[in-house]
Image (cartoon, rainbow, N blue to C red):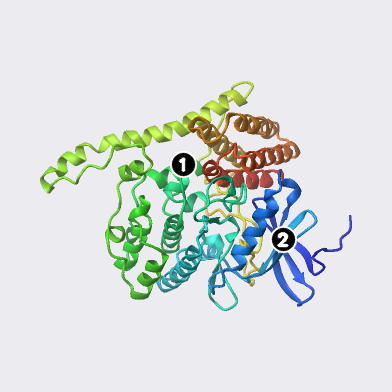
Amino acid sequence: MSNEPRRLAGRYELEDRIGRGGMGEVWRATDTVLGRQVAVKTIDLRTVPDDSGAARFEREARVTAGMSHPNIVTVHDSGVEGDTAYLVMELLPGPSLADRLREEGPLPLEEVEEVGRQVAAALDAAHARGLVHRDIKPANIVYAGDGRVRVLDFGITQLGDATGPQALTATHTVMGTAEYLAPEQAVGGRVDGRADLYALGCVLYALLAGAPPFRGPTPVATMMMHANDPVPDVAQVRPETPPWLAGLVTGLLAKDADARPAGAASVVTAFERHEAPGGAAATTVLPPEDAIRQMGTAPPPVPAPPPGQQEQNRSSAPMWVLVAVAVLALALLGWWAWSSRSQPAPEPTTTSTVTTTASPSSTPTTPEPTTSTPEPTTSTPAPTTDGPTADPTQAASDALTAFSGQVTALEQAGTVDKDAAKALDAPMRDLEKALRDGDPAAASTATEALTQAYDAGVQDASIGSDAAAALDPLLADLQDAVDAYSA
């Protein structure tokens, strides 16, 4: 095989693959015409079952290139050459906020405020164009050469008024990372700009506290925490946090999207004035029953009782606890249903209580800690993990369990067609067997087959867009876990 760099459009020499996400790969490349380093995102259109892949990529390129903002990564060029679609972007020196958190822990208050203001400004510009990012997280916020931060990877955005299979959404990309996922996004609901504001609240909490507000042993458990657990007060973790900033973070983390700040512009104003936006969203922590009601699983709201009846309220709290437990039980039941039909015979298993987001990447976006200057960072970084390192086999098994359980739950909910679930079931069983037999090559083959079956389901809408929003991050976690297992 030739060692010569691959060249696109007669000018972009692809040198090193520095990231992978969704259908695409990201390369460090040289623009031989202008003599500069760039990042090139490529998609192999042969992996797309129909012609919608090229059209979707072209729409992605147009809307992304149309955003000119100092806090959004710059797109230089795009096109299609043969079976390859490509997007050319600026290559950033980094580090990312994920790198900073991993190496330094909580950041200085003044820097958190400035980063928050810049990210909110980027979101305001995107939302004004009807774009929702859907994956705001520390790994997607990177320092540029001018000292400002850039928000990366608008390649998984969707048009705010688009629905169904025509939404601007690349299949099986990371449609949100579990630790930074809004409650409505966690349950596969309709997503708009308020989900980005919730994710920003999670990012601010992580920058202040050193870790995101919710982190469970699996992605599913983490998503349930977003939907059901009370909002933690960042001031209790970091007492020197100014009251206005703590109130802003609390407001952004409201379970009910309507209770969050009115828009990203109001968040920018809050940072400029050092005061939380007015209204309940800035000061009120919504109880879990409000989140459950928002998902349509609880009765209509009851008017607040007078102060003299507060004791009665406390005595009724177990009811919403039971509802929350029931929601979690359904997720566990979905896992059991798939497991019972996918395994030929019961075998003893060990549950590993580790974070199952993707393993740390050596790509420039999320480099390993080093004492040297960080490598360049591109616009579609691989997901990162801040938690303990799991055994590769167990991590892959946990990721498969999370994905398969969610498939079963969504099939029962009617958002995944039975035929699509059956198509996914076969490669999931092959992958489970490969992991059990200790066969990395077979595991990689099964994962590729699973990805192709998933792509086909999304393309023909047998896997609905809402279901895809819930499954995409789990499939991305599974892909990365199998990559680590097979390495």
Q: Residues within 10 Å of mark 2 (few under 14, many from 20)?
A: many
Q: Position of residue 363 (x, y in %)?
A: 66, 60
Instruction: Please give the residue where the numbered disc 1 appears in the rendered image.
Output: 221
Residue corresponding to mark 2: 86
Tell me where residue 242 sits by quadrant.
bottom left
Q: Give percent across and percent down for residue 50.
A: 71, 45
Q: Amino acid at mark 1?
A: Ala
Does residue 211 appear anywhere in the picture? no
Nearest the viewer among 8 and 57 is 57
Q: Residue furthest top?
A: 345
Locate residue 147 relative to residue 33 in the image: left or right.
left
Tag 2: amino acid: Tyr
At mark 1, the secondary structure is helix
Q: Position of residue 422 (x, y in %)?
A: 63, 29
Quarter of the rendering containing residue 395: top right
Estimate the x, y position of residue 146 in percent, counting from the top left.
Answer: 57, 79
Tell me the quarter of the image containing the N terminus. bottom right
Element assignment for label 2: strand
Mark 1 vs mark 2: give the one in front: 2
Which label belongs to residue 27?
A: none
Image position of 396 (left or right of 3):
left
